Amino acid sequence: MEVLEAIRKRRSIRKFKDTQLSEEQVKRLIEAARLAPSGSNVQPWRFIIVKDKELKSKLRKASFNQEFVESAAVVIVCCGDLISWKRTRKQVQGVLRRGDIKLGDDAEKELMERNIRAASAEMHERIPTTILNVAIAIEHIVLEAVELGLGSCWVRLFDEKKIKELLDLPEHLYVVALLPIGVPDEDPDPRPRLSSSAIIVTNK
Ligand SMILES: Cc1cc2nc3c(=O)[nH]c(=O)nc-3n(C[C@H](O)[C@H](O)[C@H](O)COP(=O)(O)O)c2cc1C
């Protein structure tokens, strides 16, 4: 399937068949996430794959009772590791050494300074950057799900504290989104989008 075809086909799916996913399907979804780009190649994403019925039911309750969180075959709890940025200096050095990115002296100095700041920042200061990076990986999963004939729906409406308690997550893991995934039992029409002219200006 072409990428644009998958993008066009994708919908948020909130009704799933009572069908399990194979290990192979789950592997492919995570592989799509694993290959996502990230700042300084830090790869701050971490995933908890929830299949257990009782746990999914609890996740539903922690997500303001959104029913499809429980009825999905799996819920991927997508987290960002807020302390992964402590490693950025090493990561950047690796990126530069391998010649993955080529920067002039000024840009290289700026990048190193940013990474020193990132490494010494408080955990909560890293939340926006972490969300940005993990979101890319999540959307890779969403599109791979389309390729596999599966449906998913981003879920951000949840009580983060409750989710962390349920899964016994350490403080440095920030829950970016839940991603319920399963075999779709609905085929919604495309939802409205702004026109190109409403979102683009050229040059200015
Ligand atoms: C960051 C984010 C958070 C979302 N959170 C929820 C949610 O908690 N519950 C829900 O039913 N849909 C959620 N959605 C799905 C959006 O409602 C949906 O993407 C939007 O209405 C457009 O529909 P479409 O995805 O079918 O094109 C979320 C989407 C995104 C990207």
Image: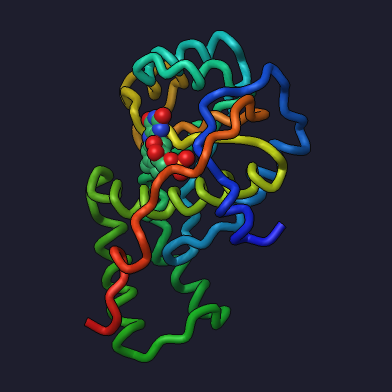
Q: Residue at x 51, y 49 (%)?
A: 139
Q: Is 143 positioned to the left or the right of 133 in the image?
A: right
Whether residue 176 is visible:
no
Q: Residue 108 at x, y = what percent?
A: 35, 82
142 vs 162, left or right, is right
On the picture, is 26 further left or further right than 172? right
Dividing the image into four quarters, tell me where ligand 1 lies.
top left
Quarter of the image containing the C terminus?
A: bottom left
Q: Position of residue 125 (x, y in %)?
A: 23, 49
Task: Pick whichever, 137 or 103, lies toward us.
Answer: 137
| Residue drawn at the location 67% of the way across and 29% of the way down | 183
Task: Tell me: 120 left or right of 42.
Answer: left
Residue at (60% x, 48% y) in the render: 9
In the depicted structure, whether residue 135 falls above or below residue 112: above
- At 55% from the left and 8% from the top, the residue drawn is 54
Asked whether residue 4 appears in the rendered view, the answer is yes
> Is residue 137 or residue 46 the one in the foreground?
137
Residue 159, compared with residue 114, is above or below; it is: above
Q: Residue furthest bottom?
A: 104
Residue 186 occupies quadrant: top right
| In the foreground, 73 or 79 | 73
Q: Quadrant of the N terminus?
A: bottom right
Q: Residue furthest top?
A: 54
Locate residue 104, reporting x and y percent: 37, 91
Q: How is the image coloured?
A: rainbow
